[in-house]
Amino acid sequence: MKFSDVNEKTWEDLRPYVDTCLLPVTGITGAEQPWEATCALEDLRDALDMFEIPYKGRVLTYPALHYVHEDNGVDQVNAVCEKLKANGFAFVIVVSAKAELANVLAQSIADLAFTLTPDLLTESLPAEKKRIAEQLMLLWAGKKQE
């Protein structure tokens, strides 16, 4: 479910069921040509499909954090994660399609971090779906991630 699917009147009814927030991280820098920015957003959309479709009703996708740089990206991501948790989400998952951000996301305070590049989704889609499902089930069951 996307943030735009929720309004003020329905949020209180949904809140007990939607305990997990997806924070998309585009990872553009501003140096991209318009078509490159479009490709980055399309890649991120494809990565988010791995969560939004099978886990609709449990996860809520927030607006993307678009401009994230490797040098201060961890601080940016962490600041947003802290606010999302303070807003009542039990779990925050960061998702990107940009390989260069894998280290940034892995260092974040998010409960889970996924870097799902187009090549990865093309080459091993079933394996990635399984890995995501396993990690989410462990997270929701309260078990420590290995």
Image (cartoon, grey):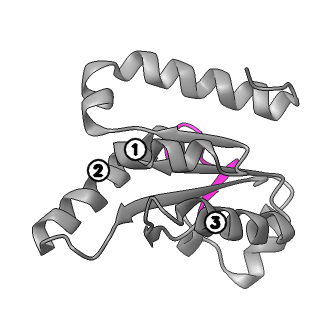
Question: What's under tag 1, amino acid-wise?
Answer: Ala
Residue at which label 1 appears? 47
Gap between marks 1 and 2 measured at Cα: 6 Å
Rendered-image quadrant of the N terminus: bottom right
Residue at 34% across, 46% down: 46
Can you tell which mark lies on residue 43? 2
Mark 2 residue type: Asp
Residue 1 seen in the current view: no
State if disc 2 and disc 1 touch (CB < 8 Å): yes
Residue 128, image quadrant = top left
| Residue found 60% across the figure and 47% down from its top | 56
Name the mark nearer the viewer: 3 or 1: 3
Q: Residue furthest bottom?
A: 8
> Which residue is depicted at the point 25% across and 27% down?
122
Q: Which residue is mark 3?
A: 75
Q: Main secondary structure of the magenta part?
A: loop
Nearer the observer: mark 2 or 3; the answer is: 3
Q: Amino acid at mark 3?
A: Asp
Check the image and report above or below for 77 versus 132. Answer: below
Q: Residue furthest front?
A: 71
